[in-house]
Image (cartoon, rainbow, N blue to C red):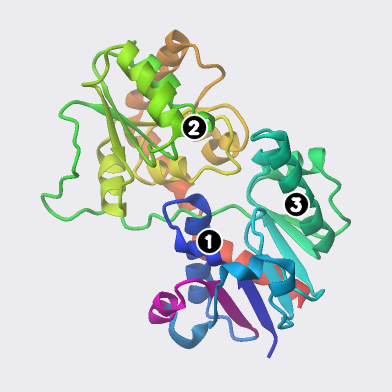
Amino acid sequence: MKNVFLESHNIGNRYFGFGQFNYHLIKGLFHADIKDFRMTLHAGDTDALQAEFGSYFDYRRYRAISRYPVFRIRKKYNLWHCLNQNIKVEPYHKMPYLLTVHDINFVDEGSPEVKRERSLRFKEKLRRSSAVTYISNYVKDYTRRHFDVPDVPEYVIYNGNPISDITLPENYRPRIESKRPFLFSIGVFSKRKNFHTLVEMLAQLPDFDLVLSGNNETAYGRQELSHAIRSLNLENRVLVTGKIDELEKRFYLKNCYAFVFPSLLEGFGLPPIEAMRFGKPVFLSNATALPEVGGEHAYYWDNYDPGYMARVFEQGMHDFESKRECREKACIAWASGFNWNETAIRYAQVYKSLL
């Protein structure tokens, strides 16, 4: 039987987008109950995966040394799926190769040396590719603008929404909780997430707190964001939680007044879809892939002037509240259209076309 190799070692870090993508795609492929080919998962903790998925998959343990050309994996598979564009692990032999592109932010970020190294690696992946999948039309267009994509099949396959269960244990409370109406956002604290603009907007909205979750142990979090909070005397109204687990995230999504996401660079952007699953009003940057994700059900900022952002928020909330039941249902229905099981089936169809 033919075998598809999933280069999925990023599954080991589920606090980040690649880890979430790997896990939910694999889980969706498991639910697809595929009979006509086998799949091999490449991961550091294969025991945990085997405990969850049993013998449905084959397993190969990841070793960091396999990133180096002389130690590349030499077994020949019928198809190699590179699950993101940054992976350094490559097959030793030439074989059918599927590349999934989440973003090419490296063309805009980092030192010249980093940009050059990542661009060269990406070009090599493109040269290997028998087909390319993108997680949004924005990523496809942006990739084609900056690189020569080979004449191979290309597909846009949206990510699914990882939140299906929106319930919480009775009387559950997170470690950090606002006692007032609050806005919520989540992500790695980096310049591209643009969180400091939310702090500046908050100064214009005295009736709200702001809860920010994610890895805040970054230079941006310690410097630019902290400076914005202190300079506006908002230490008591901006609640920085750090990394949170799934229950905490569900609590904040379920109880927030609105979800706010002024990100500057998103290949897709799962958090807005997660918020919509709870029927929440969502405010997004009118940039990169976010208009694809939010559609006509989100409200958008065209710039980041604090007064302007506050007006868009107030006008959006007035619109949402004027038809709350209708708006909530529309958000939930839209979010339900992003389904990991359906996403996995589309990837399986691509696999079949290449086998």
Q: Which mark is residue 193?
A: 2
Q: Amino acid at mark 1?
A: Asn
Residue 45 picture quarter: bottom left
144 or 116: nearer the eye? 116
Secondary structure beneath label 3: helix
Q: Amino acid at mark 2?
A: Lys
Q: Is residue 254 visible?
A: yes
Q: What is the C-alpha distance between the residues marked 2 and 3?
A: 24 Å
User: Quarter holding the C terminus?
Assistant: bottom right
Identify the residue at horizontal 41%, vertical 41% (top origin).
Answer: 276
Q: Does 224 appear above or below 347?
A: above
Image check: 145 left or right of 269? right
Q: Which mark is residue 165?
A: none
Q: Amino acid at mark 3?
A: Phe
Image check: 209 left or right of 336? left
Specify start and end residues of the magenta stretch as a single range: 37-52
Q: Answer whether residue 39 is magenta in the image.
A: yes
